[in-house]
Image (cartoon, coloured by chain):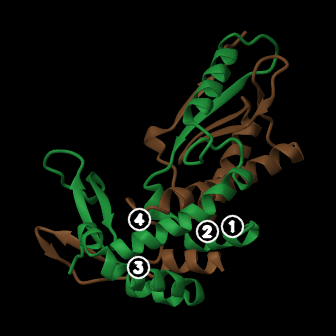
Chain colours: A green, B brown
Amino acid sequence: MAILPFFFQQCWDIVASSLFEYVNQVWVNPYLISFINSTLIVMIPKIDKPEFVSQFRLVSLCNVVYKILSKVIVNRIKPCLNSIISPYQSSFISGRSIHHNIIVAQEMVHSMASMKGNKMFMSIKIDLEKAYDRLNWNLLSNVWRSVSFDL
Amino acid sequence: MIIEVIHHCISSPSYKIMWNRDKTNSFNPSRGIRQGYLLSPYLSVICMDKLSHIIADQVEAGYWKPMRAGRHGPQISHLLFADDLLLFAEASIEQAHCVMHFLDLFCQASGQKINSQKLQIFFSKCR
């Protein structure tokens, strides 16, 4: 049974306190997350008449309560990201723009074209296949544990 | 604490697939993060940061020979655009092996796979 965000907005006076309590509880007992963490995956075809699973885009529809909880987490980690993520990454970090890296890339290609000297260089463009779906959780938690958050 | 919470967020979901207006039985994933979920972009950026670390270590150790942006410019070995990457290195067989080796290492650790059909290489002008 899906409860739409509209429900929360309309009945905010009634549901607010229990929602606050739930989100607070999660920080004490993270196991509570599994109760709201059921996700509906919808397959949206990328092309007309798809034949393979890879021709669908899988979009996850999460629980509203879960989204609210995630937003809390995102707001807490966002300010820390700038200091832990390498400067060569340009996406998803507030204060950085993908355009910066595009300009650097353009500059690099330009200097490759007008290069003089003995050394030759190469640039390799790589696309990762289904990057989200393949991601290994162990690596994630290892990386998480190796960074120190100031929270 | 926040790490525990995030860990539970990514490892506890159960999925149902909506298919022809019907739902499948629910199942639990063992890897991957969800498209359309608030935290996912940040998680993928953190995962890619691992690769950034690997490359930076190799550059520092002198195995990976990065390119300079201009004659006196800074050395740049890689640029990341979310999960797309642009790598720069000297054009030599050894460097190609080096790049491949560390990409393999990263792919093994992260579960990622390089899409070889979309891979492109550019070379600097030959004298």
Q: Chain of mark 1?
A: A
Q: Residues within 10 Å of mark 2 (few under 14, many from 20)?
A: many
Quadrant containing the C terminus of chain A is bottom right
Do the residues at pointers 3 and 4 share their chain? Answer: yes
Q: Estimate the x, y position of residue A133 in percent, counting from the top left.
A: 43, 63
- According to the picture, the residue beneath numbered tag 1 turns out to be A143
Which amino acid type is marked by label 2?
Answer: Leu
Q: Chain of mark 4?
A: B
Q: Are marks 1 and 2 in contact (CB under 8 Å)?
A: yes
Do the residues at pointers 1 and 3 share their chain? Answer: no
Residue drawn 47% across the image and 89% down it: A32
Do the residues at pointers 3 and 2 share their chain? Answer: no
- According to the picture, the residue beneath numbered tag 2 turns out to be A140
- According to the picture, the residue beneath numbered tag 3 turns out to be B13
Which amino acid type is marked by label 1?
Answer: Val
SS assignment at label 2: helix
* Left or right placement of residue B62 versus residue A12 in this view: right
Determine the residue located farthest toward the front in the rendered image.
Answer: A13
Q: Which mark is residue B106?
A: none
The numbered mark, 3 or 4, whose residue comes first in the sequence reads 3
Q: Which mark is residue B34?
A: 4
Do the residues at pointers 1 and 4 share their chain? Answer: no
